[in-house]
């Protein structure tokens, strides 16, 4: 039934929408197809034509769920929030567990299924658009189709916001909102995913390294400490870090400190001297100089501008 609807309502002059599975929905499940007339409008609208959803859904505890496609005419993003499954092709197969992301680009035949003993719970979205391939490459990088983001609240809320935006009503405005929710979701997933060897710095992944830096935000760090954590020489580590971020590691750490200072200036009445000390600056005048150099404004003026 779903496949017949899609074939009959394909958008002229565009890729045919790939068929979602016919897995029978339970009461809590969701599956939505963007109407054909709306697809035509999204394809032409300047605020949506870059990347827009063509079908999306939520499959809880999807026992018996499986899919195989030889013809794949859009991009498919799947997020496993619980349970387990497996990707059977391409690439010879791979296990899928909670926190994993599947990114299957347009044109790539594939098959996958839930494991019978612990069936996965999935959020999914088929998407297309002028920039869709670029978004798919951005998320996937040079890794394979299975990536790991973890069960991050931002990812879960992103999928829920996407579903809510697209299904609020059938007005074009709602789908334009959904299109931009989708763009945000794809970029957020890319931040969390361990996509390739370039996402690792020696023996530690980039996300873990930044977590370590945030934990030390009230103190000091040396380049050697960070390099030792990654089990690289300081020079090799600094080069790899700059390749990954475009900025030197200690300069990035200093920016993280100033971002934390902004939050404290916004949310507390602590003096600038106290905030400086909380972030490891024993000299408040030096802290103010660093803040001005980073933000282009003094801490005092920043606080006043935020409270007007």
Image: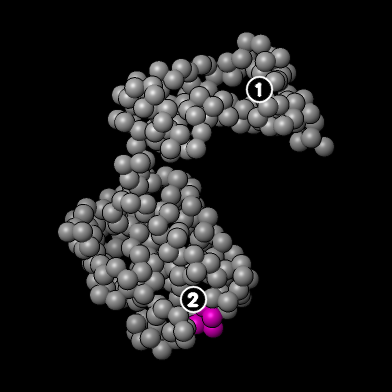
The quarter of the rendered structure image containing the C terminus is: top right
Q: Residue at x 60, y 17 (%)?
A: 278
Q: How many marks?
A: 2
The quarter of the rendered structure image containing the N terminus is: bottom left
Is 37 included in the stretch rendered in magenta? yes
Q: Nearer the viewer, mark 2 or mark 1?
A: 1
Residue 274 higher or lower than 105, as above or below: above
Residue 9 higher or lower than 100, as above or below: below
Looking at the rendered structure, the secondary structure element under dot 1 is helix
Q: Which mark is residue 290?
A: 1
Q: Which residue sits furthest bottom?
A: 8
State the image coordinates of residue 108 (x, y, percent, origin top left).
Answer: 29, 68
Q: Residue at x 70, y 20 (%)?
A: 288
The picture quadrant where one finds residue 276 is top right
Q: Is residue 113 left or right of residue 134?
A: left
Q: Residue at x 62, y 27 (%)?
A: 258
Magenta segment, which residues? 36-40
Residue, disc 2: 34
Q: Is residue 48 left or right of residue 137?
A: right
Residue 1 higher or lower than 143, as above or below: below
Q: Is residue 121 left or right of residue 247?
A: left
Q: Is residue 125 left or right of residue 203?
A: right
Looking at the rendered structure, the secondary structure element under dot 2 is loop
Question: Do we see residue 138 in this rendering?
Answer: yes
Is 119 included in the stretch rendered in magenta? no
Query: Dots 2 and 1: beta carbons under 8 Å?
Result: no
Q: Which mark is residue 206?
A: none
Q: Earlier in the sequence, mark 2 or mark 1?
A: 2
Give the main secondary structure of the magenta stretch. Answer: helix
Looking at the picture, tell me which residue is in the foreground, 225 or 244.
244
- How is the model colour-coded? one colour
């Amino acid at each position: 039934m779903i496949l017949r609807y899609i074939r009959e309502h394909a958008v002229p002059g565009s890729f045919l929408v790939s068929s979602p599975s016919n897995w029978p929905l339970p009461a809590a499940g969701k599956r939505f197809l963007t109407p054909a007339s709306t697809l035509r409008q999204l394809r032409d609208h300047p605020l949506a034509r870059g990347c827009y959803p063509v079908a999306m859904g939520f499959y809880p505890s999807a026992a018996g769920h499986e899919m195989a496609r030889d013809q794949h005419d859009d991009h498919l993003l799947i997020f496993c929030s619980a349970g387990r499954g497996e990707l059977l092709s391409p690439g010879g197969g791979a296990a899928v567990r909670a926190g994993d992301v599947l990114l299957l680009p347009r044109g790539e035949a594939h098959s996958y299924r839930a494991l019978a003993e612990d069936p996965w719970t999935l959020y999914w979205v088929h998407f297309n658009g002028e920039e869709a391939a670029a978004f798919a490459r951005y998320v996937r990088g040079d890794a394979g189709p299975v990536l790991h983001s973890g069960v991050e609240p931002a990812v879960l809320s992103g999928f829920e916001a996407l579903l809510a935006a697209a299904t609020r009503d059938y007005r074009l405005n709602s789908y334009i909102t959904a299109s931009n929710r989708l763009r945000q979701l794809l970029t957020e997933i890319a931040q969390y995913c361990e996509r390739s060897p370039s996402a690792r710095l020696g023996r530690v992944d980039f996300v873990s390294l930044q977590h370590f830096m945030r934990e030390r935000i009230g103190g000091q760090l040396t380049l050697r400490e960070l390099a030792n954590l990654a089990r690289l020489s300081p020079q090799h580590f600094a080069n790899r870090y700059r390749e990954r971020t475009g900025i030197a590691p200690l300069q990035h750490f200093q920016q993280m400190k100033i971002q934390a200072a902004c939050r404290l200036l916004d949310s507390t009445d602590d003096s600038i001297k106290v905030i400086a000390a909380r972030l490891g600056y024993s000299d408040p005048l030096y802290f103010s100089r660093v803040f001005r150099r980073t933000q282009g404004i003094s801490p005092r003026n920043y606080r006043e501008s935020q409270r007007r």
